[in-house]
Image (cartoon, rainbow, N blue to C red):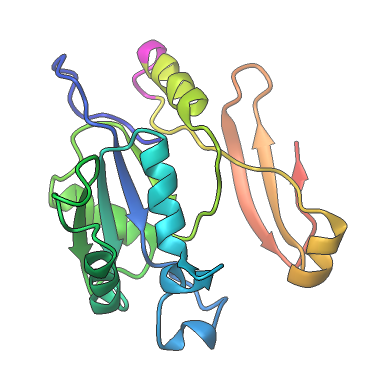
């Protein structure tokens, strides 16, 4: 959850930014001809799981940023009926295409430059498969922002893989350092190939 720019008292539309690019080559060669978000899990594109999850959590507007394979992503969204307001009355999707984005930071700078985001929003990768209820995180973020306008982000992290997952996927560890008093994130560092930890 990221911060709001406007505090004008208007009701904010629940908004999300979905990153359709992973900005990595971890799934190569599978992703050489189509993006990870269009890879299928139980005959459903990954992006469909993410969009369904956002709708379940009350998100009404989704900005989808994409760089590579933008035509394929747009075609999929049109064929699935996401771009038709008559079929998806509870969800508005806007595709933001840029061939210059090379990282999440680039995508966020592009949205900032276009002055698209006016209120708090959920930032999510387009390949998330979950049924997590976001309401608790959103409420926590709002309370934190009410107390401290400089609290710009609330992160939701899921801990630990089982041993069987590590054998298959390798250790995708991360070092996370949190402040016990206010749950502030002090350090987050991906440690591919090393064991992660929580301090």
Residue 191 appears at what percent x and percent y?
69, 60
Which of the two residues, 68 or 151, is positioned nearer the viewer here? 68
Residue displayed at 57% across by 27% down: 184
In the rendered image, the residue lying farthest to the right is: 163
Residue 66 location, quadrant: bottom left
Residue displayed at 50% across by 71% down: 43
Badge count: 0
Q: Which residues are magenta?
A: 146-150
Q: Quadrant of the N terminus?
A: top left
Q: Main secondary structure of the magenta part?
A: loop
Residue displayed at 19% across by 19% down: 7
**Residue 148 falls within the magenta-colored stretch:** yes
Which of the two residues, 179 or 168, is positioned nearer the viewer here? 168
* Residue 100 left/right relative to 102: left
Residue displayed at 35% across by 53% down: 18
Q: Quadrant of the C terminus?
A: top right
In the rendered image, the residue lying farthest to the top is: 147
Q: Is residue 151 above or below residue 109?
A: above
**Residue 167 falls within the magenta-colored stretch:** no
In the rendered image, the residue lying farthest to the front is: 87
Residue 3 location, quadrant: top left
Residue 22 appears at what percent x and percent y?
45, 67
Residue 167 appears at what percent x and percent y?
84, 69
Which of the two residues, 162 or 109, is positioned nearer the viewer here? 162
Q: Is residue 139 above or below residue 54?
A: above
């Amino acid at each position: 959850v990221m911060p709001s720019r406007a505090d004008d008292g208007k009701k904010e539309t629940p908004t999300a930014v979905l990153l359709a690019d992973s900005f990595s080559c971890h799934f190569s060669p599978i992703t050489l001809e189509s993006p990870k978000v269009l890879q299928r899990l139980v005959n459903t594109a990954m992006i469909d799981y993410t969009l369904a999850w956002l709708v379940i959590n009350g998100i009404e507007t989704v900005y989808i940023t994409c760089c590579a394979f933008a035509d394929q992503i747009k075609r999929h969204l049109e064929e699935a009926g996401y771009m038709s307001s008559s079929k998806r009355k509870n969800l508005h999707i806007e595709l933001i295409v840029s061939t210059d984005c090379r990282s999440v930071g680039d995508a966020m700078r592009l949205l900032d430059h276009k002055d698209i985001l006016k209120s708090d929003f959920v930032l999510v990768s387009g390949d998330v498969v979950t049924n997590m209820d976001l309401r608790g995180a959103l409420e926590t973020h709002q309370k934190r922002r009410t107390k401290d306008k400089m609290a710009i982000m609330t992160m939701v992290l899921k801990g630990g893989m089982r041993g069987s997952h590590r054998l298959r996927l390798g250790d995708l560890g991360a070092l996370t350092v949190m402040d016990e008093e206010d749950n502030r994130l002090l350090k987050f560092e991906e440690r591919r190939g090393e064991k992660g930890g929580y301090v």
